[in-house]
Amino acid sequence: MFQNLSDRLESALKVVKGENKLTEINVATSIKEIRRALVDADVNYKIAKDFTDRVKDKALGSENVLKAVSPGQLMVKIVSDELTDLMGGQAAGLNLTGNPTVILIAGLQGSGKTTFSGKLAHWLKTTKKKNPVLVACDVYRPAAMDQLTVVAEQVGAKIYKEPENKNPVQIALKGIQFAQENKCDVVIVDTAGRLAVDEEMMKEIADIKNAILPQETLFVVDSMTGQDAVNTAQAFNETINFDGVVLTKLDGDTRGGAALSVKYTVGKPIKFVSSGEKMDTLDVFYPDRMAQRILGMGDILSFVEKAQNQFDEKLAKDLERKIMRNKFDYNDFMAQINQIKKMGDLKSLMGMVPGMSKITQDLEIDDKAFVKVEAIIQSMTPKERANPDLLNMSRKTRIAKGCGRTLNDVNLFIKQFEEMSKMMHKMSKMPGFSGGGGQMPGGRSRFGKR
Amino acid sequence: MSFFGKLFGKKEKEDLDKGLEKTKDNFFNKLSRAVAGKASVDEEVLDNLEELLISSDVGLDTTVKIIERIEGRVARDKYLGAEELNFILRDEIVQLLSENNTVSLSGYETPSDVKPFILLVVGVNGVGKTTTIGKLAHQFTKMGKKVVLGAGDTFRAAAVDQLKIWSERVGCDFYSKGMNTDPAAVAYETVNYAIANNCDIAIIDTAGRLHTKTGLMQELSKIKRSVSKRLETAPHEVLLVLDATTGQNAIEQAKHFTEATDVSALALTKLDGTAKGGVAIGISDQFKIPIKYIGVGEGIDQLQPFDKQTFVETLFEQ
């Protein structure tokens, strides 16, 4: 895939030999790289251009300020700060003051409205202690109502639907009435997907909005959307003046530049990001993380947060010390596996680490992969686990028998383990291993040479 | 005049005009503006061209490629008139689209010596796989073919129902084992059904999946294998459905789906929602897989065979 922006900038800035500060010339080269990186990430071309002009001014203005940092790093920092700024400051909440609160969901076909509606209901139930009802207003797509029904069942929310009625305005109004009668405090109105150029359908969504007067109107966007995101967002905004944006399918490998395009064009906050098909995979939006994702810098903050939630601080510190001293053994490895398993889907986790998204893409990782490894380690004696060097042929043969694997499997694993611990040791000595954008749990940089 | 308006015959065109009249300028108009008032191709023209290509979703790599070729030409010929740019650009695009000229089946023809013809449909979530299947089934049925739809999306809520409704609408056969069943088994049995019931064509639906999910991609490979198990030559076509509003991620999608299932044809949906046919050019350049169908509207008739000749002509018509 594409290089990450930091690499690109470093090489772009090397063009001018011997430069150790930002100048008119090397900024111009890197500006082009930044623009291309943004466009690669599906940021609208015009917006990317606008944005890079701003960065240029900033970069030239900041001359001599930070002499310690390399121009490449400084450039990345400026870009990342500007982008975060542009993506909006604080995460915006939902207005839930209505009685009942009415939330209207709109968007293109296949953007993920129905799935999001379900997730939102789940989120409202679990974090806001609400009793939501889902209202099925997609009267066009075959089985759309059935889909919402199933989703409602999954999250344990009520559903209001009228299979015979082809008038979404009526259904929506009756849905609100239903909520009042059934003591539901939030009404989520799921609508049919529509194209911004379809005048008739756009009028319909406007009619629905005018009839039900929702407290919140949310516009659902597929994070993989390309250059057209701007036009779509604009058209929807003109028609229904939505309050917030929902970004879906972020579990893919898209950079999600559409998020920036939408935010820049209509200036409405992104309220939720959604990834995965399970109902509990809805997150509040963090501008800085999205900025880094667009830049291909990895979502290190989310990663760290996830890690911090799950990681045992002390264990992590011990581990780091061991890595530094090149004393990583099978017990640590086992502990690592258990930690990681607690954190959830391994691949998406790895993808959050800067530079790792490229590696994990072609890597076969699933949680079952650990089963083999665990069996092998569990077939070692405690002494062997603590001293990886101990493993000779006779021990390996015994281990293979013990775990029901071939000697080859065992050898392969040991080799991988050794390589990994070597790599970890090397990485731990790299400047910026635990500094830079995010802090690894308990992280400290450079211990110097052993 | 819309970008796609001229892509189709009279009848089809009328179908489309309504939905398309709102789309903005066509490619040529934009191009004219890019070179307006210029006697020769200079830095500014190239910049404008870059913007035009990128904002049409052609993609960065392909855009850079085209720009570089034109730059090379300017450097060689020393002088390049702005109006020549039009021809060169057209040249480049024709070349890009012709490089994958492997299949030239017109319309909805399937090879006459293959029966049943097994078509496996794959793609990420929400691109319009089921709808595309419904529309294809409609065309095949209209041609007098006996079609069966296999409900291989056993995961997404109500996906089986959705396909069933399509089969009723179209008036073709339908095979399902219900929700939450093994999709590979459904695929196998659908082929079985097609053979036993003398069907001409079997179209197998699959659940939408993001190409980054290794497990799900492996499931797809398995589905394909189980089809081959029942009928060695099958599937005869693996159709990857791409959403035309998708940006550069479409390239990644094509790459990963091809790895998992040897995609042999592409369908580009929701082209009516965007003025950007450019994505067709980008994909053709990056992948040598032919685009076979384009979705240009919600109507059951609005899935069209893709004709690159007409496509390019439309692009540059004044």
Image: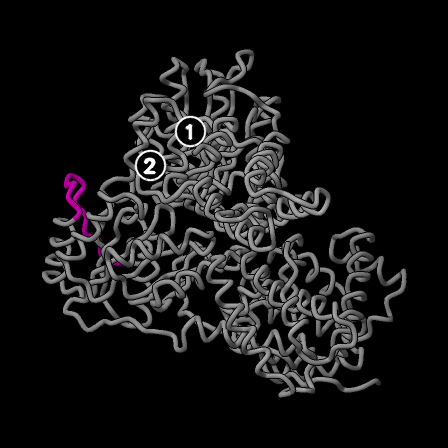
Relative vertical location of residue A211 with respect to residue A421 in this rendering, above or below? above
Q: Mark 1 vs mark 2: give the one in front.
A: 1
Q: Amino acid at mark 1?
A: Leu
Labelled disc at residue B281: none
Crowding around mark 2 (Cα neighbors within 10 Å: few <14, some 14 to 19, many 20+) is many
| Chain that bears disc 1 | B
Residue at (20% x, 61% y) in the render: A187
Tags 1 and 2 on a common chain = yes
Crowding around mark 1 (Cα neighbors within 10 Å: few <14, some 14 to 19, many 20+) is many
| Chain that bears disc 2 | B
* CB contact under 8 Å: marks 1 and 2: no
Quadrant of the image containing the C terminus of chain A: bottom right
Which residue is tagged 2? Answer: B162
Does residue B263 appear in the picture of this structure? no
Which residue is tagged 1? Answer: B7
The CA span between labels 1 and 2 is 30 Å
Q: Amino acid at mark 2?
A: Gln
Residue furthest out toward the right:
A393
Reply yes or no: does residue A163 show up in magenta. Answer: yes
Q: Identify the magenta region.
A: A157-168
Q: Secondary structure at mark 2?
A: helix
- Could you say where residue A85 lies in the image, as x and y percent from the top left? 45, 76
Left or right, B20 with respect to A34, comes to left
Left or right, A206 with respect to A31, comes to left
- Could you say where residue B190 lies in the image, as x and y percent from the top left? 47, 26
